[in-house]
Structures are given as C-alpha cells and as structure tokens.
Image (spheres, rainbow, N blue to C red):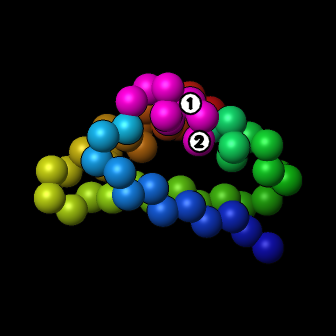
Amino acid sequence: DYGYFRLRDEGYQQVDLEKWAAVVRGLPPEDTFVYFKHEEQGFGPDFAKRFVEAL
C-alpha cells in the first residue's frame, strides 16, 4: 500500500504546505508520494522543498 497526492494549485502559501504536511504525517508509515504541479509557472520545485521542510 502507498499514499499518492498530486497537488495542483499554483498558489500554495506556507500555511497550505504545512496543512498538507500534517496530513501526510498522520498517515501510516508507508510509502507516500507527493507531486506538485510543474507546468506553466514552474513553482513545483520550490513548493516541494518547502513541503519537505514542513515535514
């Protein structure tokens, strides 16, 4: 089993990323994959970095 999240907003604020991090932390300790939208503006890598820091 694994968790899979595809976060597609291009306007995540830090509070949003922290809420998603709390959701992931609340899951059973299995593999969880979180993907950020990377089209158009290219904000995904920054969101991913800040998300990992929030974990």
Q: Quadrant of residue 31?
A: bottom right
**Majority SS type along the magenta span:** helix
Q: Amino acid at mark 1?
A: Glu
Please state the horizontal and vertical placement of residue 39, each as a whole percent of the image: 21, 62
The image shows residue 53, relative to residue 43, as above or below, that is above
Q: Quadrant of the N terminus?
A: bottom right
For mark 1, give the secondary structure. Answer: helix
Q: Amino acid at mark 2?
A: Trp
Is residue 53 in sight in this rendering? Answer: no
For mark 2, give the secondary structure. Answer: helix
> Which residue, as the protein is rendered here, is positioned at the far left?
40
Q: Is residue 15 magenta-colored?
A: yes
Q: Are marks 1 and 2 in contact (CB under 8 Å)?
A: yes
The residue that disc 1 covers is 18
Apparent side of residue 30 relative to residue 43 in the rendered image (left or right) = right
Crowd tier of the residue under label 2, counting other residues whose Cα lies within 10 Å: few below 14, some 14–19, many 20 or above = some
As measured in the structure, the alpha-carbon distance from the residue carrying label 1 to the one carrying label 2 is 5 Å
- Any mark on residue 55, and which? none
Is residue 52 in sight in this rendering? Answer: yes
- Any mark on residue 20, and which? 2
Please state the horizontal and vertical placement of residue 14, each as a whole percent of the image: 44, 26
Please state the horizontal and vertical placement of residue 3, each as a whole percent of the image: 69, 64
At horizontal 35% and vertical 51% (from top left) the residue drawn is 9
Crowd tier of the residue under label 1, counting other residues whose Cα lies within 10 Å: few below 14, some 14–19, many 20 or above = some
Q: Which residues are magenta?
A: 13-20
> Which residue, as the protein is rendered here, is positioned at the far right?
28
The image shows residue 49, relative to residue 14, as above or below, that is below
